[in-house]
Structure formats: structure tokens, C-alpha cells
């Protein structure tokens, strides 16, 4: 019931999905630090690629020397050299 109320209030007040807690919020500082909020799970992790599952689909981060600095239930902080990321298939560089 709370989830239904939360969604309804978010729709009525026109909150963005990350505020309501559904969609991912990605913050990138330079090429060295990435914070992802509202992720579902870590699908794959290596020093060169990280794949995260989110409510809106998978997110791929590619680079060098990736390290997971913070792992919480709803927040993940990654450090390393980011070269690109993509959502499923459409790449943004």
C-alpha cells in the first residue's frame, strides 16, 4: 500500500523518478568518481567493466582500474578511470 501511495504522490506532484525512489540517479565527477543511487544489483564487476541492474534497465561502465569504494543497499560508489558508459545499447561518451 505504501508503494502505491508513494507512486501516486510522486505522480501528482510530478517528482522525478529518482526522488520517488524508482529510477537510478548517476553522478559522475570528472572521470574518476561515479555514484549510482537506486540500483538493483551488481551483475558484473571487473577492473575494466561494471554492469548494474536498475529499474530502468542495465547500465554499463567501462574504463580502467575500477574499485568499489562504497557498497550500500541503494548506493554504490566507484573510483577509477571512466572511458564510457551506456544504457543497454545506446552509448554515451
Image: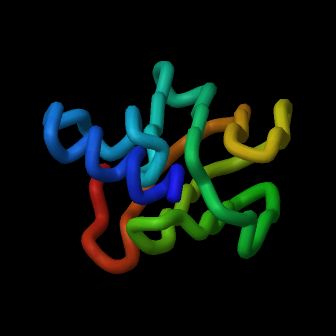
* Residue at 33% from the left image edge and 79% from the top image edge: 89
Residue in the picture at 40% in, 40% down? 20
Give left or right: position of 46 versus 81: right
Q: How is the image coloured?
A: rainbow
Q: Position of residue 57 (x, y in %)?
A: 44, 73
* x, y percent for residue 65: 78, 44
Q: In the figure, 55 relative to 23: above or below?
A: below
- Residue positioned most to the bottom: 89
79, above or below 82, in the image:
above
Q: Position of residue 63 (x, y in %)?
A: 61, 51
Hey, which quadrant is residue 90 in on the image? bottom left
Name the foreground residue: 87 vs 84. Answer: 87
Report the residue at 46% width, 38% height from top: 26
Q: Nearer the viewer, residue 93 or 57?
A: 57
Task: From the viewer's perspective, tell me whether residue 59 is left or right of residue 68.
Answer: left
Please name whichever residue, 16 or 85, is drawn nearer the observer in this view of the structure.
16
Extreme residue toward the top, this view: 29
Please say if 5 is above or below 89. above
- Total marks in image: 0
Instruction: Return the residue found at the far front.
Output: 1
Residue 91 sits in which quadrant? Answer: bottom left
Residue drawn 62% across and 37% down?
81
- Say which of 48 and 89 sits in front: 89
Direction from residue 6 to residue 11 in the image, left or right = left
Amino acid at each position: 500500500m505504501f508503494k502505491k501511495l508513494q507512486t501516486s504522490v510522486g505522480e501528482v506532484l510530478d517528482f522525478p523518478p529518482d526522488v520517488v525512489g524508482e529510477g537510478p540517479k548517476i553522478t559522475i565527477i570528472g572521470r574518476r568518481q561515479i555514484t549510482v543511487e537506486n540500483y538493483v544489483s551488481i551483475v558484473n564487476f571487473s577492473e575494466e567493466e561494471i554492469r548494474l541492474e536498475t529499474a530502468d534497465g542495465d547500465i554499463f561502465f567501462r574504463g580502467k582500474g575500477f574499485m568499489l569504494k562504497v557498497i550500500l543497499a541503494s548506493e554504490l560508489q566507484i573510483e577509477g578511470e571512466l572511458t564510457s558508459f551506456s544504457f543497454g545499447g545506446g552509448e554515451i561518451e
